[in-house]
Image (cartoon, rainbow, N blue to C red):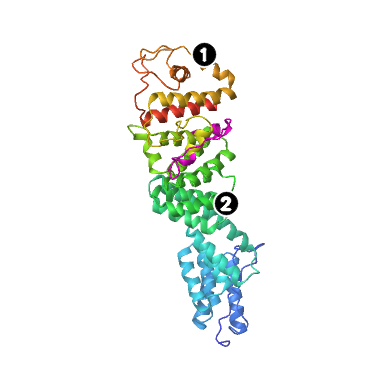
Amino acid sequence: MASCAKKPAALPAPSAAPRFADFIFPAAAPDLAPPAVAAQHRAAWNFLQAGDAKAAEREFTAILKQAPAFYPAEAGLGYAALARKDAAAAVTHFDRALARNAGYAPALAGKGESLLALGRTAAAADAFQAALAADPALTALRGRVDVLKFRGVQENIENARKAAEAGKLDEARRGYLAAIAASPESAFLYRELAAIEHKSGDHAPALVHAQQAATLDPADARALMLVAEIHEGNRDWTKAADAYAAVNALEPSETAAMKADQMRETAAFESMPAEYKSIETAPTVTRAQLAALLGTRLGDILRRAPGKPVVVTDVRGSWAAPWIQSVTRAGVIEPFPNHTFQPAGIVRRGDLAQAVSRVLSIIGAEKPRLAARWRDPRPKFADLGPAHLLYPAAARSVSAGVMTPFDGDTFQLTRPVTGAEARDTVSKLEALARK
């Protein structure tokens, strides 16, 4: 092979600097070819760096005719094609060289340049990374890899957002997953992916990714809001309340605070027995139901009231026993003289007025200015005179705006209380307590 090696053509006068300084010389191991072929190979490279790509191709081609296994010349043809801006042909030549030596760094680097010229950013980054792995001395490629990864992430994000805007949720998901693969520590990518999955109805992965976003960036209120919304959609009320509370802690707002309270109330309601849940639509309310409603909604107020020992003999085993104990100790609903509570007894408006009046006394002791509105009530009722035993309770309940008369002037003491009326009455007491 040495005897038939072609002498390289005379080189032009050397230029001040190589024409393609970024190209990596496709060096050959000493035992790959005899000195004459190596010299011709170097001469071909010099033609290329002088700007004569055609002469370089001619010389590299001549080498391959003499020594088809000399893959550095194939890589040289790749660089010559790249110099002519024929990136597709360059990739073909580099692939041929890599077929001979898959870890040949100059060919990997050249292929990266070619793929980059073809707009295949991710593949170019992979090729550069492979070249670095094959030859760590190619330190100049490290910056290229980092830039390309960032550019690839940006392209994936932009494409994913455009797909999401167009309603192409599967395409958007693929774009975000590709971006995350390149930048796994970017919290906002997980949040945006979670939003896409949540919109698609894939709530389980959406929750995982939203939580990961919040873990990576604990100050990301939008990620926490998404966590809260997913928990709410899953009817996991307690976790939703915790997440809304976390959002409110980061960015205080009435909306987040109200949502947290709403979720806690819903969680408490869902844990209640069926007897409590049925209050809302009940045509009549029992004493046990009223006790439970007062005990759950006004528990803090009842606990602050001066307590007294009470003996009740018929509530053991009742679903409402804890709340019956609470309201009787606070004196809001009193047991009967025979020490029975009669949990199944129907509540009438006179009974409700008495309970309301006693709660107003507790609130008034803490808020005397507020209590001025019901301190000396004198409303007139067509069916209830001031001398009646229950007049003070009815008058106080109406004056405080907690209960309302019927037809403008009748109180109707014996009328059964509906579930909706009981709920609204307790809600008004709760509102007064918060003022």
- Circle count: 2
Say if 193 sits above or below 66 in the image: above
Relative image position of residue 345 (x, y in whole percent): 37, 33
Q: Which mark is residue 215?
A: 2
Which amino acid lies under the numbered mark 1 shown in the image of this protein? Asp
Label 1 – label 2 distance at C-alpha? 57 Å
At label 1, counting other C-alpha atoms closer than 10 Å, the crowd grade (few under 14, some 14-19, many 20 or more) is few
* Of 17 and 327, the residue lying toward us: 327
Q: Say what secondary structure mark 1 lies in.
A: loop
Relative image position of residue 94 (x, y in whole percent): 50, 71
Can residue 83 be seen at all in this image of the molecule?
no
* Of 102 and 398, the residue lying toward us: 398
At label 2, counting other C-alpha atoms closer than 10 Å, the crowd grade (few under 14, some 14-19, many 20 or more) is some
In the picture of the structure, the residue carrying the numbered disc 1 is 376
Is 195 placed left or right of 31 in the picture? left
Does residue 304 show up magenta in the picture? yes
Instruction: Give, as a single range, the part of the protein colored magenta.
Output: 297-322
Is 110 placed left or right of 345 in the picture? right
